[in-house]
Image: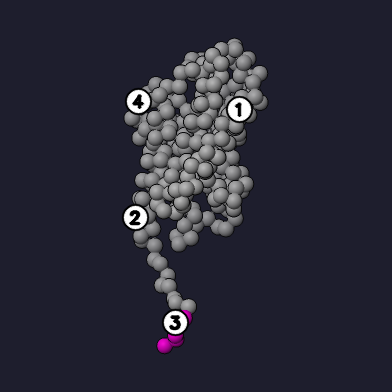
Amino acid sequence: MVFGLGAIAHMVLGDKMGSYLGVNLGFGFGVTMGVHMAGNISGAHMNAALTFTNCALGRMSWKKFPVYVLGQFLGSFLAAATIYCLFYTAIIDYSGGRLTVTGPTATANIFATYLPDHMTLWRGFLDEVLVTGMLQLCLLAITDKGNNPALQGTQALVIGILVVIIGASMGMNSGYAINPSRDLPPRFFTSLLAGAHRSSAPRTVVGASGGPPLGAYLGAIIYLIFIGSSIQQEPQILENSLDV
């Protein structure tokens, strides 16, 4: 989150110092670093939608769900606070000391996603469903040992590249939140700033927070039905079976 939000800050605040590609790279390789950091500790659960899907499919206990999501939200909130402190003078200089959600000097979009004028509530919701579904679908392919997974030791890099590709190809409409933990805590942080970012446009919250869990679940179901069921399983051999 620090890498991703920092990249957005460069794009919004910096004069030719940032770009949309830089944002994609920041989030993508930020995910790569997260997988390296926590992969063998918690499975690198950084996305509440994916954590929900793992629980819904019985791959993880529901008892872990609130603990993991709390950790995700806390980390995301602290990342927003870190970026705000790091770029405080640039934010104040750019906004003229008036922090706003919309307008030519808006800075709320550094921290959370906001739908552009051409997007409606339901289009934003469906956009997040589709994009998060693609994320989950590809993640299962990358990690499925029965299919053609990424080589051992390269999973983190490939997952990061996947996030970059999703942002570069499908991120324009809704900002590809694809993760309630990415969007809600920074949005809450900006709402706490005195006299700043008070309007959090409910229509953006619905899409960024409600769409990803549904999309992740549907993406997983599609993979399991159409891909997982087609993979030939090697016959199991009982340890105590006798040679004939």
Which dot marks residue 15?
none
Q: Earlier in the sequence, mark 3 or mark 4?
A: 4
Compared across the picture, whether 141 is left or right of 1 comes to left
Q: Dot 3 corresponds to which residue?
A: 241
Residue 211 forms part of the magenta stretch: no
Q: Dot 1 corresponds to which residue?
A: 81
Within-10-Å neighbours for mark 1: few <14, some 14–19, many 20+: some
* Residue 77 drawn above or below residue 218: above
Q: Mark 1, mark 4: which one is toward the viewer? A: 1
Within-10-Å neighbours for mark 3: few <14, some 14–19, many 20+: few
Q: Earlier in the sequence, mark 1 or mark 4?
A: 1
Which dot marks residue 120?
4
Q: Earlier in the sequence, mark 1 or mark 3?
A: 1
Q: Quadrant of the C terminus?
A: bottom left
Q: Earlier in the sequence, mark 2 or mark 4?
A: 4
Secondary-structure class at tag 3: loop
For the residue pair 185 and 163, the one nearer the viewer reads as 185
Q: Are marks 1 and 3 in contact (CB under 8 Å)?
A: no
Q: Earlier in the sequence, mark 2 or mark 1?
A: 1
The CA span between labels 1 and 4 is 30 Å
Residue 154's spot in the image, x, y percent? 58, 53
Q: Residue at x 40, y 52 (%)?
A: 57
The CA span between labels 2 and 4 is 31 Å
**Residue most extreme to the front:** 63
User: Which region of the structure is painted magenta?
Assistant: 240-244
Number of disc labels: 4
Q: Dot 2 corresponds to which residue?
A: 225
